[in-house]
Amino acid sequence: MNVLWRTLLVLARARRLVRRGRSLDPTAVSRLPLRTLPTDIDVLRHMNNGRYLSLFDLGRWDLLVRTGLLDATRERGWYPVVSSETITFRKSLQLWQRFVVETRFLGHDDRALYLEHRAVVRGEIYARAIIRARMLRRGGGTVDHDELFAAVGRPEGLPDVEPWVHEWAAASALPSTRRPAPSDWD
């Protein structure tokens, strides 16, 4: 429930920033200041590893609202979903510690959008996640990038996705929902 309230606060903050003329270019880095709360920590008294990804969602919401992408996609009945994500940890965030969630688009390929999230303390990366996302239609199916960019504009200066990101996406992919994916441990 804690992340739900934080999500609503982030959405309100992002909309307020847009009204004040602080929208973001799609190639910009979103910076969202946060603090590690008691509901974020585990029995080892540092931020729970699963909580990082939930808090990185907040950075995506901030970026989507401030770039105008969220409103443009909602008008068309589209919504973003994460299809894969990987996180790497360097240092632990402690109770009450302030940090910044930095979020940016890495680029896209023919099927997905790629984003990077960082948990940063005084300019130092504590954790980083790479996200692969797709845009889906409320009525079913995916939104291809030609249609997406026709609706919201193709961001100028969006870099090509690094080869290692494509390799990661291929290595971490599961079969499509139209193919079987049995859980065999052999």
Image (spheres, helix red, strand yellow):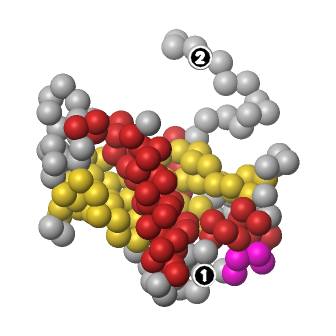
Horizontal and vertical percent for residue 133?
59, 54
For mark 1, what is the residue? Answer: 155
Please count the marks in the image: 2
As helix, strand or loop, the secondary structure at mark 2 comes to loop
Tell me the tag on residue 136: none
Q: Can the viewer see residue 88?
A: yes
Q: Residue at x 35, y 69 (%)?
A: 31
If you read the primary sequence from the N terminus, does the residue marked by circle 1 or circle 2 appear first?
1
Residue in front for this viewpoint, 50 or 87: 50
State whether the magenta stretch is mostly helix, strand or loop.
helix
Tell whether label 2 touches label 1 (CB within 8 Å).
no
Picture residue at 53% right of the left edge, 57% below the top: 166
Image: magenta residue range: 149-153
Asked if one can make out residue 142 in the rendered structure from this viewpoint, the answer is no
- Specify the amino acid type for callout 1: Pro
Label for residue 183? 2
Q: Nearer the viewer, mark 1 or mark 2?
A: 1
132 displayed left or right of 134: left
**Residue 58 placement: quadrant:** bottom left
Seen in the picture, residue 74 relative to 3 is either above or below; the reply is below
Could you say which is closer to the camera, residue 148 or residue 10?
10
At 73% across and 52% down in the image, what residue appears?
136
Amino acid type at circle 2 is Ser
Specify whether residue 150 is painted magenta: yes
